[in-house]
């Protein structure tokens, strides 16, 4: 057995085959049933010419088929490629081509876009349609593919060095494929409440002896956080619960029905509608032990509201990235409004200065959060960005996360924001996350995204795109609210009001769109 997710899942399936592995809607599969299902898809892919090291794109909503696709690709030593299902033709063309994918599983709901792009991507030679009969020549129905294939294993040996790629980003540019080895990724995203295994068999033993935990990531699986939550759950022998699409009311009903213990969201974009629905009443949350945000930080006002609605649950913020893994947990009392502070719960996390040297704790020197050890290999098809993001200093390879921070005397890391999003206005740096969090504390603001737009005097000015809770609040009220919490140079000079905020399916802000809206408002 290797530190390979396919090896580990098979070992867990052999140990606890009768335990429920996955629930989605009215479908319930045990570990043994899901393993057999994934075997069938894996054999179909291999028979269709997918070879070890080749890439299999997955453009699906959450469900059994997505989970099976991840497992099936890894079983034959192929590489799963996540595709954002909101992408339009130009973005799809880019990802299909950049990832060098040779096969694609897609939801028939997306067939018009897929059909328009596939002829321009000759490498993409095998298509599998989920949820209906395809109209694209040569595409096969998913149900036919798995029905006619072998449900046994019989796969070649795998390695902990096998590649796993997660495409991420797209808020300021086109997405990039983050490359991991399965072994490095397993340890980078390991659940810190459990000791790391000394051998792969320890993972199987952990799953076998763990209690019947029920875990529910509600982000789409095309987002790395949901995929990592999936592997964490299976390494613990937990039952994993998916919703095909995010609907706050349905999520709470599912939590009650399936007795979910741990829920994972991505920031305010999911937490706010979850809180709104919970405030309406009528939901049984007695099973819920932990409400965890990963991939995006909860603002203080939202966190406090959730804690009031879920007094018996722990509200947690996890810090990390697709490139670094999960690295730290928010310190009690920290928030984007008051200052974000994290306590690293893994080794080799620090802040490097401009010379790429660790800053002295308590010195107040501003640098960039960095991690060494268990980190990604780099970016697929982008050696220039890989060299810039993963520098080698004195023989030690680092990941520069892009998060600007200082280190306290106690070793905690105070994070100001992502450097690439910082707004330079009159020589002062403004981090959008801090301003967004303050704006969300106004009763008239449902959601907010802050960006910089050109200004003749200051170079850039701070601008806010606001989705109001009802009628748009007066700009003077927003201004006064911000000035109570922020220095004057951080207060937005321009406000744009929209009926609905544009975010990724995982809740990430679309800063390109926000910048365009703010410039039009100016």
Image (spheres, rainbow, N blue to C red):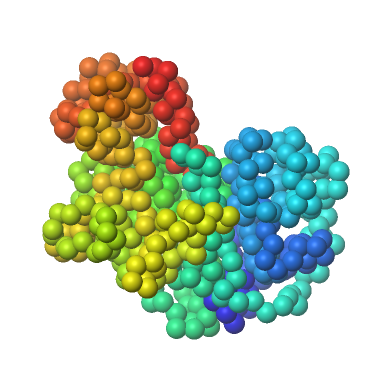
Position in image of residue 303 (x %, y %): 30, 45
Residue that appears at 73% across and 75% down: 155
Question: What residue is rendered at 59% in x and 44% in y?
Answer: 84
Q: Is residue 277 left or right of residue 243?
A: left
> Which residue does the image show at 59% across and 60% down from the upper left?
22
Locate residue 515, reporting x and y percent.
41, 28
**330 to 477, vertically: above or below:** below
Residue 33: name its quadrant.
Answer: bottom right
Residue situated in front as seen by the camera: 29 or 244: 244
Q: Residue at x 58, y 55 (%)?
A: 381
Q: Is residue 164 visible?
A: yes
233 relative to 367 in the view: left or right: right
Pick the quarter of the image with the N terminus.
bottom right
482 sits to left or right of 391: left
Q: 208 or 518: which is nearer to us? A: 518
Q: Residue 347: give x, y in percent of width and height.
A: 32, 71
309 or 436: nearer the viewer = 436
Q: Is residue 230 visible?
A: no
Residue 522 higher or lower than 123, as above or below: above
Q: Position of residue 386 (x, y in %)?
A: 48, 57
Question: Where is residue 455, by image quadrant?
Answer: top left
């Amino acid at each position: 057995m290797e530190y390979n997710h396919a090896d580990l899942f098979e070992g867990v399936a052999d140990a606890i085959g009768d335990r429920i592995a996955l629930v989605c809607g009215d479908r319930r599969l045990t570990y043994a049933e899901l393993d057999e299902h994934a075997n069938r898809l894996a054999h179909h892919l291999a028979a269709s010419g997918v070879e070890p090291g080749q890439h299999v794109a997955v453009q699906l909503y959450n469900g059994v088929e997505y989970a099976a696709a991840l497992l099936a690709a890894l079983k034959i030593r192929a590489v799963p490629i996540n595709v954002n299902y909101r992408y339009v033709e130009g973005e799809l063309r880019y990802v299909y081509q950049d990832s060098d994918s040779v096969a694609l599983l897609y939801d028939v709901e997306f067939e018009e876009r897929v059909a328009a792009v596939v002829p321009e991507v000759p490498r993409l030679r095998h298509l599998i349609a989920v949820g209906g009969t395809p109209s694209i020549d040569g595409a096969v129905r998913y149900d036919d593919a798995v029905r006619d294939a072998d449900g046994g294993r019989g796969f070649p040996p795998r390695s902990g060095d096998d590649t796993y790629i997660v495409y991420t980003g797209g808020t300021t540019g086109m997405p990039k494929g983050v490359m991991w080895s399965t072994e490095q990724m397993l340890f980078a995203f390991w659940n810190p409440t459990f000791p790391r295994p000394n051998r792969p068999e320890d993972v199987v033993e952990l799953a076998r002896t763990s209690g019947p935990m029920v875990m529910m990531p509600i982000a789409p699986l095309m987002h790395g956080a949901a995929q990592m939550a999936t592997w964490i759950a299976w390494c613990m022998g937990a039952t994993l619960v998916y919703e095909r699409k995010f609907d706050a009311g349905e999520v709470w009903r599912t939590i009650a029905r399936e007795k979910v213990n741990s829920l994972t969201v991505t920031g305010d974009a999911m937490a706010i509608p979850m809180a709104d629905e919970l405030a309406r009443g009528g939901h049984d949350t007695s099973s819920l032990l932990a409400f965890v945000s990963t991939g995006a930080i909860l603002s203080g006002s939202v966190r406090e509201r959730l804690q009031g609605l879920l007094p018996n649950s722990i509200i947690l913020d996890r810090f990390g990235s697709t490139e670094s893994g999960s690295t730290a947990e928010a310190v009690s009392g920290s928030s984007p409004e008051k200052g974000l502070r994290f306590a690293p719960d893994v080794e080799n996390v620090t802040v490097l200065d401009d010379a790429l040297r660790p800053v002295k704790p308590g010195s107040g020197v501003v640098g960039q959060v960095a991690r060494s050890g268990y980190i990604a290999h780099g970016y697929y098809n982008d050696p220039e960005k890989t060299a810039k993001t993963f520098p080698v200093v004195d023989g030690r390879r680092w990941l520069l996360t892009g998060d600007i921070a200082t280190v306290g005397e106690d070793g905690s890391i105070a994070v100001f924001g992502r450097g690439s999003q910082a707004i330079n206005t009159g020589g002062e740096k403004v981090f959008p996350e801090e301003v967004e969090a303050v704006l969300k504390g106004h009763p008239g603001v449902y959601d907010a995204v802050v960006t910089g737009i050109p200004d003749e005097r200051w170079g850039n000015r701070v601008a806010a795109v606001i989705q109001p809770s009802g009628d748009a609040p007066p700009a003077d009220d927003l201004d006064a609210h911000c000035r109570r919490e922020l220095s004057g140079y951080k207060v937005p000079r321009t406000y744009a009001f929209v009926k609905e905020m544009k975010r990724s399916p995982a809740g990430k802000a679309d800063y390109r769109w926000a910048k365009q809206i703010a410039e039009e408002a100016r």
